[in-house]
Image (cartoon, rainbow, N blue to C red):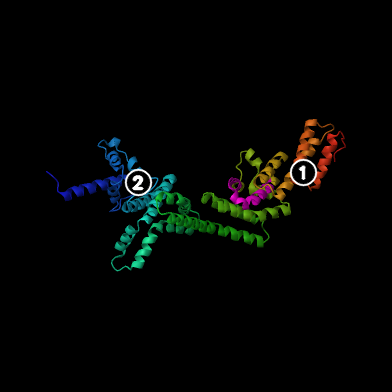
């Protein structure tokens, strides 16, 4: 007996609901329950190219052969351009739920789902008619045209605003939700590129995401900045200051090793390091940065040093960041105070000049180390010719680095005498 059209429609809807429930559980876990109208996503998917094959795989008569992979691929394309607005809306809501549900199970999948949700939301910006109609129905007949237009234009940006609020609200605690929000904000450029939205909208979204993230990062660093100011006023930079600076590391890790945190650290740590050097409290450099000897003994190098190295690598890779080259170089100069051997001091000094060749303090310190090694090579009653040649090369390099140095001049004179056969007793 043939079914009535309304019965066929009911069966089709029930099939879609069952399939959507399978998709929801596969993506977000079995604890999730489908919303009443969420199966409309499945119905909208049928209009996409390639949907017939994907649905055949999902509904294979053999339960062991049923696969949701092809449908998932349709739901998470590399670009949402050309997708109908109703489907985009369904996908945005679906993956928003999935991203939250997956946060404690699979961070990678949660990030993937969140980016897909953002991309689908952003893609709605290209469908003004759909947005206006949706908002009009939601507000009812009494809504003013101004309110409809305002809400319709803001709808694709609502998830971005929510992420910014979540990141800012928990910035000082840096809990799981805040870390996730900060991480997703870094993925906004990728989501915007996938959306297929107009270029001006994409640029606006990316700039807004960067501003929201920067505001949250600043809020996380604000109590540290205040504590450093207090330590400065109390003349306790070399004691309290170090303990405060170490607190930058959890912020750095929680923000995905954000460059702004690295910049904050080098800006605020430099006065502390200069004060340590002025007071000759050398052991405090090791308490702040650790030392290569720690690494050789299997002890992890302190994250504060890795933080500075991260900024060093950024500056090396992108010369537009040259404003921070001198700060990075100075930290390597400070670091020479905790290095135990002369050869390692020279290697660290070379890294300082690698990032900032004109750094005056770095050039002076490295020239001094080179002179010290040249003197050592020249020691002994009758130094070998090869050692004297090496000493000459070292002092020549030192002279190019800091030609006005008295130490360089005296070392050059010493090596010259030794090379010419004069061997006065060394002081």
Q: Secondary structure at mark 1?
A: helix
Q: Please give the name of the residue rendered at 83% of the width and 43% of the height, measured from the top-left corner.
A: 410
Place of residue 97 in the rendered image (x, y in percent of width and height, measured from the top left): 37, 51
Q: Position of residue 287 (x, y in %)?
A: 65, 48
Residue range corresponding to the magenta coloring = 309-335
Would residue 331 be counted in the magenta stretch?
yes
Q: Residue at x 60, y 59 (%)?
A: 227
Quarter of image, res 159 = bottom left
Residue at the image position 16 percent from the left and 49 percent from the top? 5
Name the mark on residue 75.
2
Read off the residue under disc 1.
399
Q: Residues within 10 Å of mark 2 (few under 14, many from 20)?
A: many
Label 1 or label 2, whichever lies nearer to me, is 1
First in residue order: circle 1 vs circle 2: 2
Q: In the figure, is residue 371 to the left or right of 7?
A: right
Instruction: Name the residue: 87% across, 37% down.
Output: 425
| Number of numbered labels in the structure image | 2
Counting from the top left corner in percent of width and height, residue 21 is at 30, 47
Q: Is residue 295 visible?
A: yes
Q: Is 146 situated left or right of 307 in this image? A: left
Task: Determine the residue located farthest toward the front in the rendered image.
Answer: 199
Residue 12 on the magenta segment: no
Predominant secondary structure, magenta span: helix
Q: Nearer the viewer, residue 10 or 272?
A: 10
């Amino acid at each position: 007996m043939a079914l009535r059209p309304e019965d066929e429609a009911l069966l089709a809807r029930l099939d879609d609901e069952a399939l959507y429930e399978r998709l929801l559980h596969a993506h977000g876990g079995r604890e999730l329950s489908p919303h009443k109208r969420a199966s409309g996503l499945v119905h909208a998917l049928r209009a996409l190219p390639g949907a017939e094959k994907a649905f055949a795989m999902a509904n294979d008569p053999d339960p062991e052969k049923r696969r949701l992979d092809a449908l998932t691929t349709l739901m998470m394309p590399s670009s949402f351009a050309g997708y109908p607005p109703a489907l985009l809306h369904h996908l945005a809501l679906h993956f928003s739920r999935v991203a939250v549900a997956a946060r404690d199970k699979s961070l990678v999948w949660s990030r993937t789902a969140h980016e897909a949700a953002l991309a689908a939301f952003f893609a709605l910006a290209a469908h003004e008619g759909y947005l206006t109609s949706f908002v009009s129905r939601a507000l009812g007949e009494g809504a003013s045209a101004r309110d409809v237009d305002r809400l319709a234009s803001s709808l694709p940006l609502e998830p971005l605003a929510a992420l910014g609020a979540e990141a800012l609200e928990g910035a000082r605690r840096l809990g799981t939700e805040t870390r996730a929000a900060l991480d997703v904000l870094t993925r906004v450029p990728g989501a915007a590129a996938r959306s297929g939205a107009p270029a001006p909208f994409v640029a606006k979204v990316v700039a807004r995401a960067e501003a929201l993230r920067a505001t949250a990062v600043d809020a996380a660093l604000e109590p540290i900045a205040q504590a450093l100011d207090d330590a400065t006023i109390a003349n306790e930079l070399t004691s309290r200051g170090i303990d405060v600076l170490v607190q930058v590391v959890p912020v750095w890790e929680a923000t995905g090793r954000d460059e702004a945190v690295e910049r904050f650290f080098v800006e605020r740590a430099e006065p502390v390091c200069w004060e340590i050097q002025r007071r000759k409290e050398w052991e405090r450099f090791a308490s702040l940065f650790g030392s290569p000897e720690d690494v050789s003994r299997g002890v992890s190098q302190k994250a504060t040093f890795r933080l500075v190295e991260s900024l060093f690598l950024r500056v090396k890779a992108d010369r537009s960041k040259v404003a921070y080259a001198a700060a990075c170089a100075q930290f390597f100069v400070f670091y020479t105070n905790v290095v135990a051997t002369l050869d390692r001091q020279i290697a660290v000094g070379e890294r300082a000049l690698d990032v900032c060749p004109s750094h005056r303090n770095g050039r002076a310190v490295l020239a001094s180390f080179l002179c010290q090694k040249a003197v050592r090579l020249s020691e002994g009653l009758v130094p070998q010719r090869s050692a004297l040649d090496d000493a000459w090369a070292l002092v020549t390099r030192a002279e190019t680095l800091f030609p006005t140095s008295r130490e360089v001049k005296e070392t050059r004179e010493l090596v010259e005498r030794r090379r010419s056969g004069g061997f006065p007793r060394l002081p």
